[in-house]
Amino acid sequence: MSIERTNRLKIALQKAKANLPENEDLKTENKSSLGRLLNKPSSLKEKRSFLGNQPIHERPLIDAIAKETFGNDVEYIPKLNLRNNQDEQSNAQHIASRLKNMRDRVNVEPTTPLGSRVGFSIDGKPLWASIIDEQRQYPSQPLNQELVPIQPHERLHHSNLAPTQSTWPLQLQISQKKTFKQWRVYGENRGPTQACEAIIDQLGSHMNPLLMIGLHGTGKSHLLHATGQSVLRYYDKEVRIIRGTELISASSLPHDWHEALANTCLLLIDDLHLVSENDNLATNLGHLVDHALNLGIQVLATSLTHPDSWASSRLWDVMKNSLTAELAPISSTSLALHVKRESSLQGLLLEDAHIMYLLEHTGNDWRSVNSSIAMLANANQKGDVAHQPEDVLRILANKPKQEEQIHEQSGSSITLASDIVRTATDVIYSDKDIGGIELHSTSLDLPEDDWEPRIVSVDEIHRANDLIEQHLKTTLEELTPEAPSVLDADFRDRHLTHQLGQLEGNDIDSAVDVMVGIDTEIDRVIAEREQQMVRDDLRLRNLESQMEALLERTSSADANELIDIVDELRYIEHELGLVSEDAMEAFELEDEEAKNLVHLARIRPKAILTGEEE
């Protein structure tokens, strides 16, 4: 404790002692013998406390406790009125007064209503804090009139204030187009998407300002608009948008843009690189962005180029140190995934070949791909289904089907002459000939000819047919190669069979065994191939029925069912790979190679042992 506080305490004690009565020095002798032995005084002194000796105006603690407990002006009301003044009041008045006193004692004050804000009481405290104070029996008093928040019915409430008269920058309105519901996240735009989500969570205090850089067709404007729509739904403030295409046609900015930024929480600027090329607009817009940042407004902009390539201006000075997020051009892989997803949502079953043809026709562009998918879905609803991959190009090129094309060609060939004549008469006009010009032609004068067709007899026709058949037979015999045989002997061993002329003895048994083994092997291979074909046929029929069932489920399926359908299609694709056309062609090639291979048998002489007697 400091010396100053010690001195103050001593002075206060001296003042308190001065108010105490002086101690009486006279001591009376104790009348009790035991008291005299114990040296006790004759009477006990009254204990005087410091607080009790102070006057009322110097006891603020007691006064505060009394006011809190009893109130300022409290009149004592006894439980029973024992006055018996018969002259003053009668029994009825006496009973009425007692009932009145009873009602006053049991009167319950009305509970304080809840505040207009959800989760807060009328005094501005959170609801949980008010409940805890009530359980702890803490006194809860309403706020002072100067601290009470403005109510909605009062004139100065923000809902009753007139809106700003400034219309620029334009205020973004709530819309269902270009939102995150239509936005698709892939590897090329994942980083900027996460940055915009962080901006929505921490508006104005995180990544401010943010500049999104990307080429044409990467989705910068879509992501900018989707972020603004989300902020409009999550926050109760305005969102303003500035488009560079509108500013380049204006000579200067409006002068009342300060009023528009008063109640703005997000400022969107699209195509900022267009403004950077104009020195006057770049300077004024730089002051606007700087003012918005000073007010704590979140600034989100898009540009085709980096600020390092801009000309020096106030806008370049503000945006050169901003956080940048780059949107890379969409790759073919991501576009293929996008096409497969969107086509399945619209009831289209496109294979990889269909998607390849679609991407070759549209290129790596979001708008072209979405338009092509919509065109395929429209054609599918009208009955023009893209069964083959080539049908995708035909539908996107607005070409009719093959049957319709043949019908149109046949019709045009019939009416070609009439169309030519009609066109000619419509174009040619003459003032001299009344009624127009007539088109006519004369027939050609051909010379007379005495030629007559030759009459062919029946015998000549038969002889000609026999000659043709003989010629075909001889020609085909010369052209047809001789089929090789697996039983042909080697040219070095042919003299063994050609000299004998026929097989004899043990050679017959060996030849029979070989032929029987060949027939058995042929039958076994044919039986296995037939069983394999039957199994493949059953498997293909089962897969066909599964695909028809999936096609019926796709029309009325939701997102989860579509995911299950895609998994089942992958399983079907795997099963089809086992019996695909490539595998069948490989089997056929193996069979052809096996047929073309000629294995020549070689017969060796066999030594037969005979007995000595022979």
Image (spheres, grey):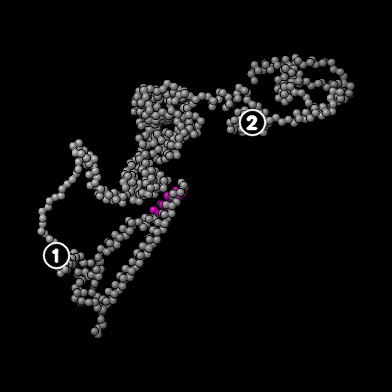
Q: Mark 2 belongs to which amino acid? A: Pro
Residue beneath label 2, please? Answer: 113
When the figure is inspected, residue 454 is found, relative to residue 93, above or below; the finding is: below
Horizontal relation, residue 92 to residue 424: left or right: right
Percent across and percent down for residue 210 are 42, 30
Quick one: SS at disc 2? loop
Residue nearest the viewer, comparing 452 with 408 = 452
Q: Which of marks 1 and 2 is nearer the N terminus?
A: 2
- Using the rendered image of the protein, determine whether residue 198 is visible from the camera's viewpoint: no
Task: Identify the residue shown where x is 67% and y is 28%.
Answer: 139
Using the image, tell me which numbered label, if any, was put on residue 288. Answer: none
Callout in the foreground (1, 2): 1
Q: Does the magenta stretch include residue 567?
A: yes
Task: Identify the residue shown where x is 31% and y is 73%.
Answer: 516
Quick one: SS at disc 1? loop
Task: Identify the residue shown where x is 46% and y is 29%.
Answer: 239
Q: How crowded is mark 1: few (under 14 residues within 10 Å), some or many (20 or more)?
A: few
Q: Give the range drawn in magenta.
A: 561-573
Residue beneath label 1, please? Answer: 455
* Main SS, magenta residues: helix
Q: Do the residues labelled 1 and 2 touch (CB within 8 Å)?
A: no
Horizontal relation, residue 40 to residue 566: left or right: right
The picture quadrant where one finds residue 241 is top left
Q: Mark 1 belongs to which amino acid? A: Ile
Residue nearest the viewer, comparing 526 with 491 = 526
